[in-house]
Image: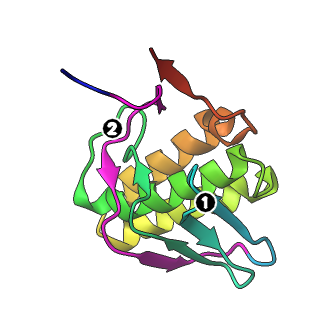
Amino acid sequence: MITTSGKLVYGDGYKYVVREPWSAQTPIVNAAARIVDSEGHLLAQLDQSGLLTIHAGYAWDGPSGPTVDTPDSMRGSLAHDALYQMMRSGHLGEEWRELSDELLRDLCLQDGMGELRAAAWFAGVRAFAGFAAERQPETRKEAP
């Protein structure tokens, strides 16, 4: 016999999970924000000095859009996803979107992405990713 406790509550899936804490200095200052899970565990934080720290357990879907996940895009996509999630949740103002997009480009360039590809990514998020930074209610699904 199989026994369960309560309903399964879940959200849409992610491809990657951070296994060790990771940090990046951002140009976003005087705008602290954080992401916590449903149990109150800190998953990501942005401090007043602009230091973005992603803690073990944070999940993200890698680079979005018509692109391929490559090593030179992983750090940029992680930072970008965390900052956009902070905006969606209302903890970080959307006025920080352009600097978040620039950080994506800059991290990709630091990691060896070609300038043309990084410029195309930057243009793509500037033109098409605004909806992903808009404040949105949390989506939760329940299985019987």
- The residue at 41%/75% (across/down) is 22
Kind of element beneath mark 1: loop
Q: Which mark is residue 139?
A: none
Q: Which of marks 2 and 1 is nearer the N terminus?
A: 1
Q: Where is residue 96 shown, x and y percent of the image?
A: 74, 59
Type of amino acid under label 2: Thr
Q: Is residue 91 above or below residue 4?
A: below
Type of amino acid under label 1: Gly
Q: Is 117 on the left or on the right of 70, as rendered? A: right
In 3D space, how far apart are the residues under numbered discs 2 and 1 (Cα atoms)?
33 Å
Q: Is 36 on the left or on the right of 116, as rendered? A: right
Q: Where is residue 32 shown, x and y percent of the image?
A: 75, 72
- The residue at 37%/31% (across/down) is 66
Please state the extent of the stretch shown in magenta in the rendering. Answer: 4-28
Q: Where is residue 143 shown, x and y percent of the image?
A: 44, 18
- Furthest residue in direction front, as rendered: 1
Label 2 belongs to which residue?
67
Label 1 belongs to which residue?
40
- The residue at 53%/74% (across/down) is 53
Front residue of 102/69: it is 69
Based on the picture, tell me whether residue 109 belongs to the magenta stretch: no
Q: In this view, does 71 lie above or below 50?
A: above
Assign the C terminus to one quadrant of the image: top left
Based on the picture, tell me whether residue 10 belongs to the magenta stretch: yes
